[in-house]
Image (spheres, rainbow, N blue to C red):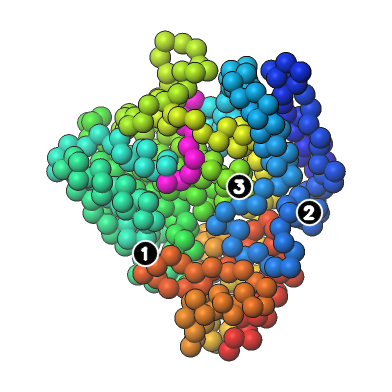
Amino acid sequence: MRRRDLLSGIALLGSGAALSKAREVEKPAAPPEVDDWESVRRQFPLDRRFIHMSQFFLASHPQPVRAAIEAHRRGLDENPFLYVEDNIERFETATRQAASAHLGCKPDDLAMTDSTTMGLGTFYNGLQLDEGKEILSTTHDHPATFRSLDLRAARTGAVVRRVPLYQRAPEATAEQMAEALAREIRPRTRVVAVTWVHSSTGVRTPIARFAQAVAKANQGRAENDRAVLCVDGVHGFGVEDETMASLGCDMFAAGCHKWLFGPRGTGILFATAAGWSASTPSIPSFDRMWRSGAQLPSAAEMTPGGFHSFEHRWALAEAFRFHGGIGKARIAKRIHELNEQCKRGLASMKHVELLTPLSREVSAGLVCFNVAGLKDTEVVARLKEKKILASTTPRVYRVDCARFAPSLLTSPSDVDACLRAVRELA
């Protein structure tokens, strides 16, 4: 992989004398050699006094993204009206094209959001459900899914039913989870809402198998009775080498400011034709500001309107290019290797309970664990004293554990240092 492959597209449209002309912004002084992971890490201005094992929480911006944000910010500050008026169509188009290339879908399959929660709320709030129809979800989902579904059910008379996919996370298997979900799909089920990677346990669910189970349940059903598969995909997005076609879901929501290292406050909402037909807009779209044509695509109608942080949304294209320049397959391989190093090291310690499965098939980038005799908050505090930034699961999950999240910004030596620190907690 060559430097120019990673940096393709970094020449950004910025403000010039007329504020609507293109100009090339300064490129990173030290472009990353993607065969050298340390070179990739140098693109991020992280505090090197710490080992950052919680980068899934909120991203640090790599240099190309920071440069893009700054270019757009200058243009907006110098002349907000002309910069938007003269450039919005090409910037919005470029963002969707970069996102669709990464996801393996069409640009008009995508609505743009500010976060996973906005995507889930936008889609679930518009679900078309008759009284007595069912939303099938799981006990492992994020509160954003729980609350969005409960609010919609209360307004429509639909029923939300939550089921477990596994009893003990370390023993979860793809086959067992798929069978557990398939057993629970009933004739009145219209929506199946799941999460790709559970942030409470690190378990990665088999979305493609779930899609097969939903498709089987839909056989023989009338069009209006078909169920759609909806996915909170944020902790697999930017980790796994998958496309929307390979996953096979009807809806997929994710923030771009976690594993993708995109601009903070950006997200995507994908749906198939069947997915979009299951929901209607609840927030007016502003896409008519820049799109031509009498009728907006469904995804455009589902893009919440209002003025957003344009400099961040338009810089999102650079995050996809940065990620793509390294390569989705190489990133997935790297994160899984670090993940396995971390899990196997923790599993070898008698005073540690590893909650995340060892199997690569049912795990991704999150590693959840407990240390005997210590609360999860105490584990995180003790690690912080050693300049290691871990995290705890949110209390709403009612699963207390500490979490490591090896990412592109983690080295094998960082993982070794974390394992030594945990070993010293015995």
Q: How many numbered marks appear?
A: 3
The nearer-to-camera label among 2 and 3 is: 2
The reply to whether the magenta stretch includes residue 110 is yes
Quadrant holding the N terminus: top right
Residue 375 position, x and y percent, is: 47, 81
Q: In what element is the residue under mark 2? A: loop
Disc 3 or disc 1, which is closer to the eye?
1
Residue that numbered label 2 is attached to: 42
Identify the disc placed on residue 10. Answer: none
Query: Where the C terminus falls, by quadrant?
Result: bottom right
Q: Is disc 3 placed on a helix, strand or loop?
A: loop
> Which numbered disc flags the more N-terminal residue, 3 or 1?
3
Classify residue 417 as left or right of residue 164. right
Q: Is 196 rendered above or below residue 349? A: above
Amino acid, disc 2: Arg
Category of crowding for the residue at label 3, using alpha-carbon neighbours closer than 10 angstroms: few (below 14), some (14–19), many (at least 20): many
Q: Are marks 1 and 2 in contact (CB under 8 Å)?
A: no
Residue at the spot 65% in from the left edge and 72% down from the top edge: 388
Distance Cα–Cα, label 3 vs label 1: 25 Å
Give amino acid for label 1. Val
Mark 1 → mark 2, Cα distance in angstroms: 36 Å
Instruction: Compare residues 16 and 234 and report the one nearer the observer.
Output: 16
Which residue lies under the disc numbered 3? 260
In the image, what residue type sits under mark 3?
Answer: Leu
Residue 251 is situated, as x and y percent measured from the top left of the image, at 41, 39
